[in-house]
Image (cartoon, rainbow, N blue to C red):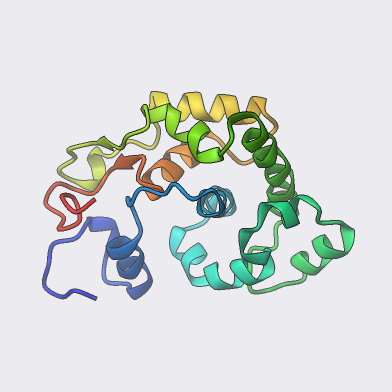
Amino acid sequence: MKKNIKRCTWAGDNSYNIEYHDNEWGVAVHNDRQLFEFLILEGFQAGLSWLTILKKRDNFRNAFNNFDYHQIANYGEEKINELLSNDGIIRNKLKVNAAITNAKAFIKIIEEFGTFDKYIWAYVNYKSIANKFEKLEDIPAKTIESDNMSKDLKKRGFKFVGSTICYAFMQATGMVNDHEVSCFRYNEV
C-alpha cells in the first residue's frame, strides 16, 4: 500500500478500499469470468456499501464457485439453501436468485456475441471513457451509456442491473476512468 500519495476521496483510509482502489478499480477488464464477478457483486451491493462487499468478496468467491457462470446457471434448491444459510455472504434471496438468473442470461449473450466482453464494451465503443472529474461530488451516479446498458440487460432477463448498478460496474471494470484527476491512479489507468 502506497503511503503519502493522493487518492480518490472515496478510498479514505480503509485498507480494503485502498487495496481495491490502488489495484483494481478502473482497470480495464476483458475476462468474461471477471466481468461476471463484478456484475454479480455490484448487484449484491445494491443498498449496501461497497466496503461490505469487499470484506466478503473471498467468501462470495468460495460460495459461488469462483463466479463460474456455467456452474451458477445450474444451481438448484439445495445450493440456493446453502447460500442463504452462508453468513459469509449477503443472504438475500432475491439477490441469490438474481445471480442464477444472470448466469443464464450471461451465457446467452456469450452464445450470441462470442464473449460477454465483446457485448458489454460496445457501450463505450470498445475503449475506456476518460472522464476528468476534480472531486467526488462531480462523478455521476449514472450516464446515458449506463442507462442504455441497463435497459438492454433487463430486456435480456438480467436482474439487479439498474442504471446506477451498471455505472458502478463500468467504473469497476475500467469502461470509464472516474479516478479524480488529482489521484495517482488517474494517469495509470
Question: Is residue 74 something that shows in the picture?
Answer: yes
Residue at horizontal 15 percent and vertical 75 percent from the top: 3
* x, y percent for residue 2: 19, 74
* x, y percent for residue 168: 43, 44
Residue at horizontal 58 percent and vertical 30 percent from the top: 113
Residue at horizontal 59 percent and vertical 35 percent from the top: 114
**Viewer-closest of 86 and 171:** 171
* x, y percent for residue 95: 68, 51
- Where on the picture, by quarter, is residue 121? top left
Question: Is residue 47 something that shows in the picture?
Answer: no
- The image shows residue 118, relative to residue 82, as above or below, that is above
Residue at horizontal 77 percent and vertical 71 percent from the top: 85
Residue located farthest toward the right when viewing the structure as drawn = 77
**Viewer-closest of 117 and 92:** 117
> Is the N terminus in the top left, top right, bottom left or bottom right quadrant?
bottom left
Q: Is residue 137 left or right of residue 141?
A: left
* x, y percent for residue 20: 36, 64
Q: Is residue 52 left or right of residue 114?
A: left
